[in-house]
Image (spheres, coloured by chain):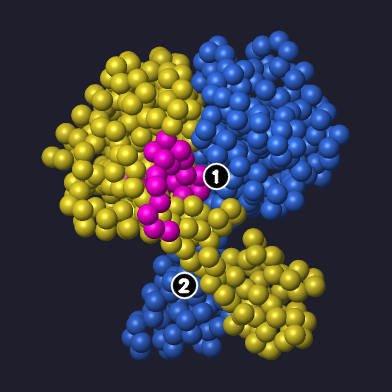
Amino acid sequence: MKELVIISGKGGTGKTSIMGAFATLAKNKVLCDADVDAADLHLIIEPSIQSRHDFKSGRTALIDENRCSQCGQCRDLCQFQAISLDFQVDPVACEGCGVCVHFCPENAIDFPINTCGEWYISDTRLGLMVHARLGVAEENSGKLVSLVRNEAKGMAEKTGSDLILTDGPPGVGCPVIASIGNADAVLVVTEPSVSGIHDLKRILALTEHFRVPAMVCINKYDLNQKLTDDINTYVRNSHATTLGKIPFDTGITHAMVQAQTILEYDPFSETSQAIQDIWQKVKDRVFT
Amino acid sequence: MIISIASGKGGTGKTTVAANLAVSLEKPVRLLDCDVEEPNLHLFLAPENGEIETIKTLVPEILEDKCTFCGKCETLCQFKAIAIIKGTAAMTFPELCHSCGGCFKVCPENAIMASYRELGTTTRGHHQDIELIYGRLRVGEAMAPPLIKKVKSYAALDSINIIDSPPGTSCPVIASMSDSDFVILVTEPTPFGLHDLTLAVGAVRMLHIPFGLVINRSDIGNQDVKDYAASIGMPVLMEIPFDRQIAEATTNGKLMARELPGYRENFLTIFEQIKNIV
């Protein structure tokens, strides 16, 4: 069983739309939405949730004013300026380090576990899907990413699936690192813009750092032919490989509005053909 | 005044709005790029003579000749950044450390020495009359918020500060937006744009910051974003229609407020509306 993770560095390059198209094309797979911070795949896949689970992770300090003597030690120790002058803990600023809890001379600080999101196992018209929703302003997105990937792996083993298709988050930080560790391959979706190239270089450096094989596809390639050529040249001299390019196509938006993948909405369009070619190459590489 | 640009969904045009607003406004203007995972503002407004500073965070280093392997630091650490093998060895995992300082304080033997982990860099420079400060997270570093806070610390009281936030709604976004006087949310009128916008609205409301909306590529997709904005009383500050010429120019790092007539005035109008609200 293999796992392919779709990432991009820069947001909005078309990860989720391409993920949706792959979900239409791939057989015998489990889908996993690891962009837990702003999950969107469910909007085109329309999952029917079979089971719902709390995601508990990390702790937040909570001062009990009845026990607190207002000595101020906690405030002096807190490196995150999370304790106010009137001894209230700001749950957003609190890092959950527990230093105040440990050193409070009155034992006046509780340290409950946070429920910071939910995760789900769902049926969809395109197969099983594991996805999640991180609470707004929550931390520990990396842990939730690891959790949904693990659950997807468990489901894939149980159902004898060949492949896990994972929609990753943008950026290069904590949730992205959590989404690519031990993956069999990543597909980076980029676009020919100064921002796209800049971010592509950073995400390829990250995949190299973690030794994950990387493939690249260029979305909206016709918005800037010169930068598309530059990307091809750059990737050729890197550890990654460019698999293909996809034209700018408003059909992707129309499909999204209809809650369909582009392959369902317009299977014979130039875009759908380009994605099928890329999918064939992805399969050849991931399964050999 | 501090104005943050945020979005929920990536690629909706946050950086475009931040850069165009910066060139349009009366100076002094300071641009703070807090999207430290993928900073892009400097590609649109390249600073001259950028001054680069390496930003580090405190992590423990255990002096094994003083350490009695009692395990107090390991018990205190919530992030599994210290492992003690009872009676024999101590190990640290600096990349997991959140720099809370607890281990230094709890160690009865004074066996923990200050060491540092590199988070990334900040670059400060000028693009014409705009001051630009951007953070760049070290590739492989997981924690963005401490570097974001460092970039934000350069906000100046006597100038308009524009913060370009990362996408999403979790801790890096909150670190970027908090303490702002106003948040401009940028979206596109598509199902993904709407969904992530509702999450971003939740985050801004939690911080009790007034906010308004810029709808980019306003003529694609459907009406749902406008209906949503109306239903919650969110002012629409500007609509930018899709224009292939703008899209192509943007790929080359060009700004519509400089290249096309009328846009500078439109961005100034955004600012006038914000001033009236704040």
The circle on residue B168 is 1
Q: Amino acid at mark 2?
A: Glu
Label 2's element?
Answer: strand
User: Are tags 1 and 2 found on a single chain?
Assistant: yes
Tell how many labels: 2
Whether B171 is drawn above or below A277: the answer is: below
Quarter the N terminus of chain B occupies: top right
Number of residues whose C-alpha sits closer than 10 Å to that of mark 1, classed few (under 14), some (14–19) or many (20 or more): many
- Display colour for chain A: yellow
Q: Which chain does the numbered disc 2 sit on?
A: B
Q: Nearer the viewer, mark 1 or mark 2?
A: 1
* Res. B61 mark: 2
Point out the stretch of residues depicted in magenta: A31-52
- Whether A34 is among the magenta residues is yes
- Would you identify the image quadrant in which residue B156 lies? top right
| Quadrant in which residue A188 is drawn | top left
Q: Earlier in the sequence, mark 1 or mark 2?
A: 2
Which residue reaches farthest left?
A: A288
Rendered residue at 58%/53% (across/down)? A136
Q: Colour of chain B?
A: blue
Position of B139 relative to B260 (above/below): below
Q: Is residue B216 left or right of residue A3?
A: right
Q: Residue B98 location, x and y as percent?
A: 53, 65
Relative horizontal placement of residue A85, taking residue B13 as reference (left or right) = right
| Residue A249 percent location from the top left of the image | 42, 18
Mark linked to residue B224: none
